Amino acid sequence: MQPTVGRTNLERVKTLLWACIGVWTVVTVARFGHGIGATSGLTDVAPWGFWIAFDVMAGVALAAGGFVIAAAVYIFGLERYHGFARPAILTALLGYIAVAVGLLYDLGIPWHIWHPMVFPQHHSVLFEVAMCVMLYLTVLSLEFSPAILEHPLFHRPVFQRLLQFIKRITIPLVIAGIVLSTLHQSSLGSLFLIQPFRVHPLWYSPILYVLFFVSAVGLGLMMVTLEALLSAWLFGHRVRTDLLAGLGRVAAFVLPLYVVIRMGDLWRRGILPEALDGSWQAGLFLLELLLSAVIPAVLLFIPRVRHSVPGLATAATLVVFGMIGYRFNICIVAFDRPENMPYWPTWTELAVSVGIVAGAVLVFIFFNENLRIVDEHGPAEPVPASRPAAPTPEGPGFYTPALRRHSLAFVIAAALAVGFLPEDALFGPRPRPTPVRLARSLEALATPAPPPLRRSFHVSSLAGNVPRAAEPVATRVLVVDGNRDWRFVPFTHDDHIAALGDQESCRLCHHQNMTFDQHSACYECHRDMYEVTDTFDHALHIRKLSDSRGCTVCHSPEIDRRSRDTALACYECHGDMVVRGSIIPTVERKLVGRAPGYMEAMHGLCIRCHADLARRAPERYAEFDRCDVCHREFQDTDHRRMAPYVPMPPGHVSADAMRSQPSAPAAVPVPRPAATTRPEGRP
Amino acid sequence: MSTPDRGDPMFAILTDTTRCTGCETCVHACQRTYNLPPDRAWRWKQKIDDLSSSRFTTIIRRPGSKFVRQQCRHCLQPACASACIVGALRKTELGPVIYDEKRCMGCRYCMMACPYGIPRYSWEAKVPLVRKCILCYDRLKAGGQPACTEACPYGATIFGRRDALLAEARRRFAAEPGKYFTPPGRSGPEIYGEHEVGGTCVLYISDIDLSFLGWRPNLGDEPLPALTWAALSKVPPVIFGVAAAMSGVYWIIGRRMKLQAEAAQRAAGGPGATGH
């Protein structure tokens, strides 16, 4: 019994880890309930993000300690590192399981994860990586199985025979592990060979596989070091600085080798100057190289530093974070995507990765507490002061204070996570709103054009682009581009009024149901460019109809399931919503307060008439239903107001020149000096 | 349209951007053919009319009322198909690069590999799939032509055998000299897609520079799968080399340690002492 349980480092760390697991659980439900799009920041230009960069790329590299130490101990006969072998193999095993679990989150169809085995495509690097990781996971399990089989639980002859067999095949297993690790550690680099256009030249290299392998060896050594220091801190072990210094000395040769190969490759391909050109990529490259290899190598080269705990800890931390950074840079930061579509991971993405790591660490701690991991050989270590007491009948039983604390951390973290979940993750992905804005009224010049277009429009303020010979006529157009994406319809409102019967014609195209408004502007109800807007105010109707008849005014008492679709259509009370002869398709849509997207509303309104005209009067309106009859660019290149910077073509008159010549053949009214906008012109 | 014959060169599409008015009839024909959902403003879309899981083809608007149809290029040696871990993407003999959603596991390596950034993902779905133009493979097999080329009212995008379309493009270059864009440093206009990354089945001729269609302005003529193969072909030697080296080292070091132990034993002088 330890009265101080809960006050130790180990207990604090475990509580924290359980909180991470709580968040992870919530995010997991969201990820598999609503899909990747709802829970990640991934896009079509960033198909691989944090999950691949951290869980897979960095995860595999961090687990490289397993094969490096196994090689040192079993192949090179460096027996004194035997004590590191089991923790390193356990870390590798948990690391690879974490990689596999992380992949399940990233794969769009995770239940097809076994497909590479039955549909092999051996031209894919990813196929090689998948096969190696799978086989290596098996090898690691076998390498680690003695630790489990030694447990009293397995003290049966059959298990002991199995244990003897596995111990006998240790060397072939270790060699297989080294071969597989060599292959897939390097192949993770080869994954990017096919993207010479997207990976920044400072990171892209035809020998990426060599760089990934060498950096993984260096990282593996430092990861084992960091892990030994951390578990010493957690479990109260003595730090074997003499042994760790030995690892550091090897790393002090591997890391410079990595730097030399990387720089040598840049130099050979003539890209070295780019590393010093002052761009942010160059800065990032130098920083990454300094932190991941140069500084740690210098530190480890000094015997006094590599024999001290702070020195080792600093070097190991730098290498671990630096090499993770290397993977991130290739996969995300130095990976080309359009500037207007940056990739930022969502917190839910980070929570998945943190949760997987937390789970792995908890399993690591569990194995350390229950199996012989650290003290496999050599003198038995003192029992960690923090080892939790086994539940005893007279003690608190199963519900130890520690368990209560862990559960509490789990529940609170999970509750907080639910509270902070983004809307998409909570309710499923929903399109972003595209608010619609008022159509603008604009002075334009119209020039005759061949049918079916009949006229071309030019922005008046840029009238300099219109040749005088083209006989421009001043006209007013509504620029219909609700979402201001510069794909507009220059709509000649006045001409449509004239064609449809002057002041009487408003009702043909405009709803008439808004209070004191005979021609409500379209954007007032069709508020989203693509999505349906709900214009029905249920609460208001309840208030207005709050007499005994209440609900049954709209909801027939015979209908059990009251819904909008089983209720009375709006126009059955608000008769003025439907106008005789109107073009608006109101009655057939049953009009229950759902205003379709602006684009759909506009298309529905215009295309019907145009198609009708094209069919009924083909001699005048042939092809009048073609898209480009309405959807037009203004005829100058200038609609983004670039015109002042575009040289005028020869034979064109500037607007100023037109203004100063009152005797110009076509009486062109002098346009306003700038493309003015004013609220939608209402006749 | 004649029925496809295996011996013939591949089918292809030629898009002449000078004839395109940006009317999107091809887009709508495609959406109808594949029963695609309406375009919606998802988070992962910058523009509603970008290629997406609801648009296998779209029209890119360029300054000066220029329109360029965007779609899968159906490369002769597609990077996506070489990257696909399960062979869900496959180059067919007729030309189209097709997709088998029953095999796909959703790793999205194809989207990373494509030099044109074409494949899209249905991120909104719970079971998301890779979405891209498949050159109407089923219609081609049945002897027809793709829905887009059939729908184009201006003949801006046409369908045929790749060699016939290349000849047609050159004929247009010759018929109207100066009309089409000549890349800087070249003697005459060029067909975009004739040689890019080993050649594509979707060809373009244009009066504007089309280099914006790839991730880099100049994609080069080398097919991308070769870059990967340079590394992958080294796998067997690495397997045997590393295995042999490790076994050798194990044997040598083991033997040396044994000899050392024996020497130490002899030095200790105890013939009765045992090694282990």
Image: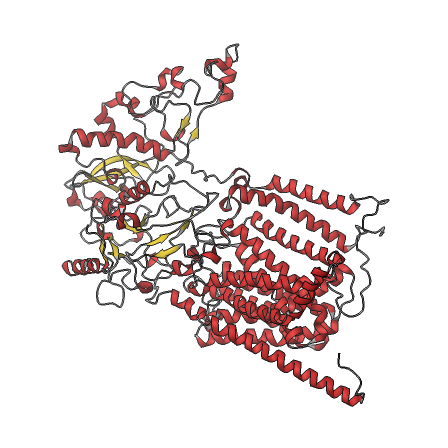
Front residue of A31 and B6: B6
- Tell me if residue A305 can be seen: no
Where residue B115 sits: x, y (%)?
38, 59
Q: Residue furthest front?
A: A157
In the image as oriented, which residue stretches furthest toward the top? A548
Q: Observer-nearest residue: A622 or B256? A: B256
Q: By what rule are the colours in the image chosen?
A: secondary structure
Q: Quadrant of the C terminus of chain A?
A: top left
For the point 37% across and 61% down, which residue is it?
B216
In this rendering, the answer to whether A437 lies above or below A282 is above
Rendering coords of residue A216 (x, y %): 58, 68
Q: Is residue A189 above or below residue A356?
A: below
Decide which of A169, A202 is in the foreground and name it: A169
Residue B230 placement: quadrant: bottom left
Residue A585 at x, y percent in the picture: 32, 25
Instruction: Give the image quarter of residue A323.
Output: bottom right
Q: Report the side of A342 relative to A416 (left or right).
A: left
Q: Is residue B95 above or below residue A418?
A: below
Say whether residue B115 is visible. Answer: yes
* Left or right: A249 in relation to A121: right
Counting every numbered tag in the picture gives: 0
Residue occupying the point 44% across, 62% down: A124
Report whether A668 appears left or right of A288.
left
Give the farthest residue toward the left. A619
Of residues B19 and A92, the one drawn nearer to the viewer in this rendering: A92
Residue B128 x/y as whole percent: 45, 46
Residue plotted at (41% across, 35% down): A531
